[in-house]
Amino acid sequence: MMREVELLIIGSGPAGLCAAISAASSGAKVLILERSFKPGGQLIKQTHMFFGSERQYASHRGVDIAGILLKKVAEYGGQIEIMLNATAVGFYEDNVITVLKDEKEYFKIKAQSIICATGAYEKSLAFPNNDLPGIYGAGAVQTLMNVYGIRPGNRVLMVGAGNIGVIVSYQLMQAGIQVVAVLDAAPRIGAYLVHASKLARMGVPILTSHTVKEAIGTDCLEAAVVCELDEKFQPIPGTEKRYDVDVMCISVGLSPLNELLAMRGVEMKYVGQLSGYVPLRTETCETSIPGIFVAGDASGIEEASSAMAEGYLAGLCAAAKLGHVPADFAQRKEEYLKQLEDLRSGPVGDRIRAGMKISQL
Amino acid sequence: MRITQHPILNFDRGKEINFTFNGQPMKGYEGETIAAALHAAGVKVLAKSLEKHRPRGFYCAIGNCASCQMIVDGEPNVRTCITLLREGMTVETQEGKGRIE
Amino acid sequence: MFEKTGVATREMVMTKFPPLERINRGPVAVVECYQKIPCNPCQTACPTGAIQIGDDINEIPRRDEAVCTGCGLCVAKCPGLSIMIVDGSKSAETVEFRIPYEFLPLPEAGEKVVGLDRAGQPVCEAKVIKVMNPPAFDRTPVVTLEVERKYLYDFRNFRREA
């Protein structure tokens, strides 16, 4: 069985949904593949208000933004189809994507154009016993807590003081769970400092220049030993501290998920500033292979606000290449590029801008 | 382990689902994944690792890392963090690789 | 220090407070946003144009104390929950704060709670005057509390007695 589609979007997170809305509004017919049983990607567990401007729904909670975007998708009823429980497992030279649906049906899709919006995954951290149950990705705990309403445990140690680490810590406290400390190996907090302050004034210590020395437990996590690091990131002997915790959240960054693009033969490059291997792309998100686009965290780790703006841009440009050029094409393109520039122009965007430069085609 | 009151969210739980874990009867709710329901019941060890048989729980909860694979209705390597509960499901701890009969 | 702990120093805090005369005249917003990040809902929420960020959304918000009416619409809109309203016009001994509080159970008017500083340490007693949680605040309730004047620059949060 081979299904033919005009525009295929892989992933229904913020980038994928915005790409679909943008392309459909230009007149394209879109199929979205989503490997989960729920659309919305990681938006569905974000209970905090988003940053950015009105254009990226700032001040709305992520979970509500998923609702807003899905409502827009529904308005293009005949034009956008979301296929759930459908994992893209292969991407071949003739632009054929193989799909595993419901873990049993296996079939092919041939697309005239493809937008890869596959997102990212959470990195792990190496320390003795890091595989004990009770040690979870911070995002995984957020899913358990905010999607299913289940407490991950009673006392949590958060490893990583980036945005995800401090946001999930705050959300753990909202669910009535104690956070004993937030650590980070870096000498400075990586998160937006307003998020860190929110947590600090709840009495949660944020320990920079600290790392996990080991986890303790037999079947499950029972305690963690942490220690201080010197300027060269070496453990300082005698600084060990033990925390009795039943949960440790690892929040040491994300890696782009884009193996499908690598499989297809798109030109890839390791770009540290974007947190891993990323496809080279044009200003309008097109990869080295014409008609194949990338948007969101799959192209480099950023915030959801940028993922949405990239999605809108990629959707607009992919549809235009397929012949769907709306009257306001130039204006819309300009607008999305301006949004991205705004989101990346400040000091917290330094790293992203540097990464973008290296990965530009 | 279930959150009943939350300042931002409402958890409208679906109907009760009965399943078994290593032969023991368990309850979860419609719309929940296997791993979530087990965690709510206090079960964190989902599998044993391939070589050293160390306990494994879930890690990513997005179906990416393979840490949560269990035997479900006799089928091994099911990613329980993204597989929804169904009435009458049999769920078992997976030891090592798992075999297809 | 701030970048290591998330706790703003007294000097930093003082740059965000308007002069005492202004606080004594009536409610005014204190916008504790110290870092350039891409974010501008406070500007969008302000009905009087008192909070300005400008075209570059990365700029740090500036609050014009002469224009700010202390209406508080920005408090529940700030994604970083960095804004509070201070009002020194009610009494010579105390000052009123309006702060966001996204936890359950919510306190009740009249309740005595523990006032916390920016590091979450207990500093004073605080009395809850009012709890506002209208749909427009979108689940970020705003609590009005009365605190002794000498804690004006210390008080930042509270916790209910166990």
Image (cartoon, coloured by chain):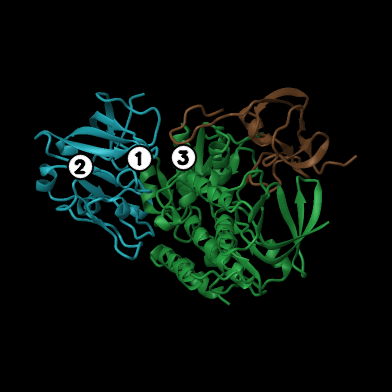
Chain colours: A green, B brown, C cyan
Q: Position of residue C160 (x, y in %)?
A: 33, 27
Q: CA distance from mark 3 to mark 1?
A: 18 Å
Task: State how far apart marks 1 and 2 are (Cα).
Answer: 19 Å
Q: State the mark number for residue A147.
A: none
In the rendered structure, the residue with mark 2 lies on which chain? C
Q: Residue furthest right?
A: B101
According to the picture, the residue beneath numbered tag 3 turns out to be A171
Label 1 CA crowd tier, 10 Å (few <14, some 14–19, many 20+): some
Q: Is residue C16 left or right of residue A185?
A: left
Location of mark 1 (residue): C137
- At label 3, the amino acid type is Gln
Number of residues whose C-alpha sits closer than 10 Å to that of mark 3, classed few (under 14), some (14–19) or many (20 or more): many
Residue A6 sits in quarter? bottom right
Q: Are marks 1 and 2 on the same chain?
A: yes
Question: Could you classify mark 2 by the number of other residues whose Cα lies within 10 Å: few (under 14), some (14-19), or many (20 or more)?
Answer: many
Q: Dot 2 corresponds to which residue?
A: C86
Q: Secondary structure at mark 3?
A: helix
